[in-house]
Image: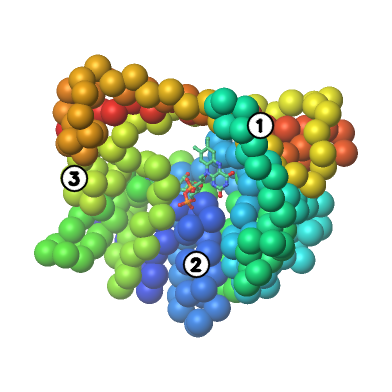
Amino acid sequence: MELQTLFPEILVIGAGPGGAAAAWSLARDGHDVLMIDRSEFPRDKTCGDGLTPMAVSTLRSMEVLNKIAEVNPSIIERVRMVGPFGAEVDLAFRDYMPDSQHHALVLPREAFDDILRRHALAAGASFMGHTTVEEIEMAADRVNRVVASSPDGKFVIEAKQVVIAVGANIGLLRRCGFLKHKPLLIRASRGYFSGVDMPANRYDFFLIMSYYLAMDGSSQLETGERISAQGSCLRFGAPIKPHGTCWMVLLRVVHARP
Ligand SMILES: Cc1cc2nc3c(=O)[nH]c(=O)nc-3n(C[C@H](O)[C@H](O)[C@H](O)COP(=O)(O)OP(=O)(O)OC[C@H]3O[C@@H](n4cnc5c(N)ncnc54)[C@H](O)[C@@H]3O)c2cc1C
């Protein structure tokens, strides 16, 4: 059976911050942009929810900061880092980043990503949620066509240009040949906590790092061979709201065999 085919000028796969910012920029320049995502929005994403001062600068240049302000993000002016042996440093962004915004922000990805996506729509991009790219067919070094599926069934998209912004969807990137090797495996979990007593305008990072190498030698780290290394990093971030929410991220890194 012949599949229905769409012909947008530019297809953006993935409507996270990367895809939405690309779609916004291209649509603002007058291009016909279709953005698709396997999720319906708003959707959550495991993340620390922190936007650095440089990210805030970029968002200002995208003229979207006013929409972010409407959801009342935490404004972060300082960062404190505590090392594994108790050494600590407390810095004000203003003293170290004179050319960028003097503050960072914290807001949930569920809100942030949807604001950026809607910003792209306001610039003229169109969006299809619940639409998963299953195959990207290449011809030489170009994307020839994309096969996607939605609740209405499979269809084909043939675009002049394709932006692949699927984040850490390693499976798709490997199937398409963009990722030659299996990257490091990272497991993360994120949670929000209430009633945590922390200063409202500061990121606090508590770092706990440990690496256990089964074999010695840095060359093994480069090749990834015979490595059984693991590290853990415990981070407490800024409280998000006056009610004292904070986030915590646990990372465990395992070097995969190539
Ligand atoms: C635990 C953790 C904490 C983090 N903390 C921070 C932080 O505090 N600050 C920060 O700046 N960054 C942080 N990051 C990194 C940040 O999450 C990523 O850099 C960011 O999400 C990348 O944006 P993106 O648009 O490239 O991808 P994503 O945000 O991952 O978006 C990709 C989109 O593509 C869609 N997609 C994937 N595959 C398909 C497919 N086949 N078909 C259709 N759609 C598809 C997904 O549904 C998704 O919406 C953290 C990451 C982790 C894991």
Q: Can residue 212 be seen in the rendering of this structure? A: yes
What amino acid type is highlighted by mark number 1? Phe
10 Å neighbourhood of mark 3: few (<14), some, or many (≥20)? few
Q: Residues within 10 Å of mark 2 (few under 14, many from 20)?
A: many
Identify residue for label 2: 23
Image x and y of residue 131, in percent: 44, 47
Q: Secondary structure at mark 1?
A: strand
User: Which kind of residue does numbered mark 3 sit on?
Assistant: Lys
Residue at x-position 32% and y-position 23%? 229
* Residue 90 image point, x, y percent: 70, 45
For the residue labelled by badge 2, is the local secondary structure a helix, a strand or a loop? helix
- The CA span between labels 3 and 1 is 34 Å
The foreground one among 216 and 30 is 216
Q: Are marks 2 and 3 in contact (CB under 8 Å)?
A: no
| Residue assigned mark 3 | 180
Viewer-side label of 3, 1: 1
Give whichever of discs 2 and 3 has the lower sequence position.
2
Q: Position of residue 117 (x, y in %)?
A: 59, 58
Label 1 or label 2, whichever comes before in sequence order:
2
From the viewer's perspective, is the residue at label 1 or at label 2 nearer?
1
The disc at residue 236 is: 1
Farthest top residue in view: 214
